[in-house]
Image: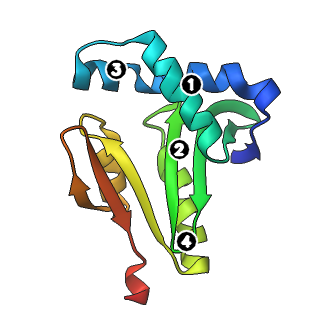
Amino acid sequence: MITYRPADPKVDLEFARRTHHAAYHDVVVRQFGSWDQEMQDRFFQQGWTRAPQQIVLLDEKPIGVISVEELDDHIFIHEVQILPEFQKRGIGSRILGDTLAQARQVGKLVKLKVLRKNDAKRLYERHGFVCWEESDTDYKMVWRDEEKI
């Protein structure tokens, strides 16, 4: 059973850092050719303080971190980080489904950004996200409730 709880900065910081690094390592190496630990520590710290964080639990065991922020005109998914050993089990789909259900209730778009070499792009596309802008490093994607268009 997948549940969520608010991240406690004192208790969850190191778990969240390890999860970030484990979830991003292979993608970063694929896209940029190497892993710079200090740079990734800075990226993690910026994300950790940018928006609310939740710990993803599978049967009460921490397996990931998500950061979803409700803004005035849309919901932004800052992060979905699942430990590699729990990926490809439908957990990302469940998290997205929960977020999209929330968006439907409040009538908002959902936006996110994904690195170009991140396989998660296919997951987002399966859930109805489309690319609305791209750069050399990432895709900006958006989902809208087709029933309300």
Mark positioned earlier in the residue sequence (2 or 1) = 1
Question: Nearest the camera: 106 or 74?
Answer: 74
Q: Amino acid at mark 4?
A: Ala
User: Which residue is rendered at x = 37% and y = 81% of the image?
Assistant: 146
Q: Can residue 97 be seen in this snapshot?
A: yes
Mark positioned earlier in the residue sequence (1 or 4) = 1
Tell me the crowding category of disc 1: few under 14, some 14 to 19, or many 20 or more residues within 10 angstroms, Cα based.
many
Q: Secondary structure at mark 3?
A: helix
Q: Secondary structure at mark 1?
A: helix
Q: Amino acid at mark 3?
A: Asp
Give the spatial CA distance, label 1 vs label 4.
26 Å
Q: Quadrant of the C terminus?
A: bottom left
Tell me which corner region of the image, top left, top right, bottom left or bottom right, holds residue 32: top left
Mark positioned earlier in the residue sequence (2 or 4) = 2
**Disc 4 designates what residue?**
103
Give the spatial CA distance, label 1 vs label 3.
13 Å
**Disc 2 designates what residue?**
91
Give the spatial CA distance, label 2 vs label 1.
15 Å
Question: Nearest the camera: 14 or 122?
Answer: 14
User: Nearer the viewer's eye, disc 2 or disc 4?
Assistant: 4
**Disc 1 designates what residue?**
19
User: Nearer the viewer's eye, disc 2 or disc 1?
Assistant: 1
**Disc 3 designates what residue?**
26
Tell me where residue 85 appears, x and y as whole percent.
50, 23
User: Which residue is rendered at x = 55% and y = 33% of the image?
Assistant: 46
